[in-house]
Amino acid sequence: MPKHQDRPSKSPQARQLGWTLIVTSTILILFSLFLPATSPQSQPYSKFIDLVRADRVERVQIGSNRIEYVLKTQAVGNKTEQVYTTVPVAQDTELPKILRQHQVEFSATPVNGGICHSLRDERSLGTYCF
């Protein structure tokens, strides 16, 4: 009959550390499952334009397939910045003009790692990418 070899017993600190890691990991997993992720709220393009014309938009980031924008804090009524998204309308070539008229800070997301330059003049603040 083979003899059962005695294992060296773990120290109390090692056992406590092990249980602490297990409990902490479980709590973090439960928080990630039940707390909602803050993702941008999607809005129709027409509502985005209405908000710009009502001077409620603070800044805009324009991408090839998505526009992200942030409302002015007075318009939201709280200090937390909420990001909204919409899908750009390709035929709307007036968007930069409307943004300038309503003094909205805007930039474009570079496509394929393009080079961006910020230009500032008395009428607008924008980032232009090549």
Image (cartoon, rainbow, N blue to C red):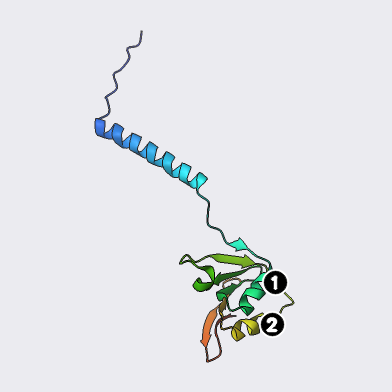
Percent x, y for residue 64? 65, 71
Q: Which residue is mark 1?
A: 46
Q: Nearer the viewer, mark 2 or mark 1?
A: 1
Q: Which residue is mark 2?
A: 94
Mark 2 closeness class: few <14, some 14–19, many ≥20 residues within 10 Å: few
Q: Residue at x 61, y 66 (%)?
A: 85
Kindly give the residue lying farthest to the top in the view shown: 1
Kindly give the residue lying farthest to the right in the view shown: 91
Q: Does any portion of residue 106 appear in the rendered image?
A: yes
Res 100 → quadrant: bottom right
Residue type beneath disc 2: Glu
Q: Residue at x 51, y 45 (%)?
A: 34
Q: Does any portion of residue 88 appear in the rendered image?
A: no
Secondary structure under the numbered disc 2 in the rendered image: loop
Tell me if residue 54 comes above or below residue 86 in the rendering: below
Tell me if residue 68 comes above or below residue 20 in the rendering: below
User: Which residue is nearer to you in this view: 80 or 20?
Assistant: 80
User: Which residue is nearer to you in this view: 113 or 126?
Assistant: 126
**Disc 2 from disc 1: Cα separation:** 13 Å
